[in-house]
Amino acid sequence: MMLQSIISSLNSHKIVLASGSPRRKTILQNHVGMVFDVVPSTFEENIDKSLPPIEYVRETAKQKALEVAQRLCIGDGSPDLIISADTVVKQDNMIFEKPKDRQDAFNMIMRFSDRKHSVCTGVTLVCPVNSTAFTGSKVEGYENLLMTQFHESTDVMMAKLTPEIVNAYIDTGECMDKAGGYGIQAIGASLVEGIYGDYYNVMGFPLHRFCKELLEIYNKK
């Protein structure tokens, strides 16, 4: 309900989600009521993984947004707002993205067993400098763009798991396209003992923080 007062006006603008994630699309459509086009970024996610996880997700989300902006923010018909995000799981300051294969998924989940880890999402909002609806800070090297960035972290406590439980979960096929190798919104929820923070952030998009930030950069008329 945070954006209820502006959602009709918001949806009169051309908004692009620079992500092919079905979970982010669902969150924005079903829980925000936002109307947007989906234009997945083609940015090769090759940021140095030795960076602190927060810096890593912020920079990856930024590069995703800028890649889409370079393609779309040209002349008439360019979007009024581009939304991008990147999510990783971190534990012991190590970054865990989507598993490469079954063994990688098994190793990840067993590492999380009976321990706490954090889910970190970086979000970047980009708009043209001539936008009549959105504000932001100038982007170095991109004179025609303004940008807002933020991030959110959620702590997750995984239950104590056996190899049999983990292998059975991997057999569902649910884990391979998700950071950390599990999905809290489906069968993977049964592996989680508890969370502290934004549930939707664990799904891949920090809903409350996004609404709060969007209210701040949206210029009410």
Image: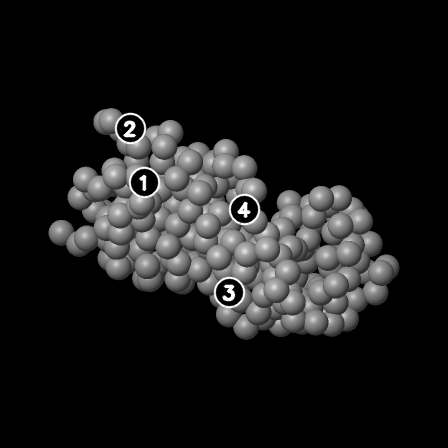
Q: In the rendered structure, which amino acid carries the disc numbered 4?
A: Ile
Secondary-structure class at tag 3: strand
Which is more N-terminal, label 3 or label 1?
A: 1
Colour pattern: one colour
Would residue 92 be found to the left or right of residue 56 on screen?
Answer: right
Q: Which residue is identified by label 4?
A: 47
Would residue 169 be found to the left or right of residue 133 on screen?
Answer: right
Q: Label 2 near label 3: C-beta < 8 Å? A: no
Which is more N-terminal, label 2 or label 3?
A: 2
Residue at image position (74%, 67%) is 113
Image location (x, y in percent) of residue 204? 53, 54
Q: In the rendered structure, which amino acid carries the disc numbered 3?
A: Ser
Disc 3 and disc 4: Cα gap in Å?
Answer: 19 Å
Query: Looking at the image, is mark 2 or mark 1 nearer the viewer?
Result: 1
Image location (x, y in percent) of residue 189? 65, 61
Residue at image position (56%, 49%) is 48
Residue at image position (39%, 50%) is 124
Query: Looking at the image, is mark 2 or mark 4 nearer the viewer?
Result: 4
Q: Which residue is identified by label 3?
A: 153
Q: Label 1 near label 2: C-beta < 8 Å? A: no
Secondary-structure class at tag 4: loop
- Disc 2: CA contacts within 10 A as few (<14), some (14-19) or many (>=20): few
- Disc 1: CA contacts within 10 A as few (<14), some (14-19) or many (>=20): few
Q: Which residue is identified by label 1?
A: 141
Closest to the observer: 158 or 96?
A: 96
Closest to the observer: 130 or 192?
A: 130
Question: Does 198 sit above or below residue 210?
Answer: below
The disc at residue 74 is 2
Disc 4 and disc 1: Cα gap in Å?
Answer: 19 Å
